[in-house]
Amino acid sequence: MAKISVIIPAYNAETTLRTAVESILSQQVPELEIIIVNDGSTDGTDRLCHALASEYPCIHVITQKNAGICAARNRGLEAASGEYITFCDDDDLFWQGALLSLIHISEPTRLALIS
């Protein structure tokens, strides 16, 4: 199965980020990579990002000065190694099976899907 990278731009997401990450981890997708881009948060987001990365080896953290969500997404794209790439905002949740469905739909035709 193809590797998928999920990029999460995070800004002051101390209260929502863990739930978003857990919704991605529960997807049961092999070779999953999660890239959290901490976009200059001023709360405990940076500490949480690194705690999550120490709990789950598939999580990578990038910390940058606040540059906005588009810059954070682009920074995540530069670091992503997945054959498939998608985004999840720091306060969003993925429905169970969503990533696997995207892969199964796109693999036969090599279709690019953005969720």
Image (cartoon, helix red, strand yellow):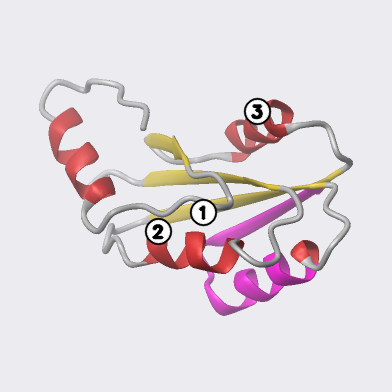
Measured from the top left, where is residue 107 in percent x and y? 17, 31
- Magenta highlight on residue 76: no
Other-residue count near label 1 (Cα within 10 Å), few / some / many at <14 / 14–19 / ≥20? many
Sequence-first tag of 2 and 1: 2
Q: Residue tagged by mark 2?
A: 24
Is 13 situated above or below 6?
below
Q: Which residue is mark 1?
A: 34
Residue 11 percent across, percent down from the top left: 74, 49
State the residue position of label 3. Answer: 74
Give the farthest residue toward the bottom. 55
Above or below, comparing residue 93 to residue 67 in the picture: below
- Measured along the vertical axis of the image, is residue 31 above or below residue 8? below
Under mark 3, the amino acid is Asn
* Pointer 3 local density, CA inside 10 Å: few below 14, some 14–19, many at least 20: some
Residue located at (86% from left, 39% from top): 66
| Labelled pair 2, 1 in contact (Cβ < 8 Å) | yes
Question: Taking 51 as reference, is 81 above or below it?
Answer: above
Cα separation between marks 3 and 1: 14 Å
* Quadrant where the image shows the C terminus: top left
The residue closer to the viewer here, 106 or 39, is: 39
Residue 50 within the segment the image draws in magenta: yes
Front residue of 47 and 16: 16
Q: CA distance from mark 2 to mark 1?
A: 8 Å
User: Of the residues under marks 2 and 3, which one precedes in the sequence?
Assistant: 2
Q: Secondary structure at mark 3?
A: helix
- Residue positioned 80% across, 68% down in the render: 44
Viewer-nearest residue: 5 or 46: 46
Disc 1 is placed on an element classified as strand
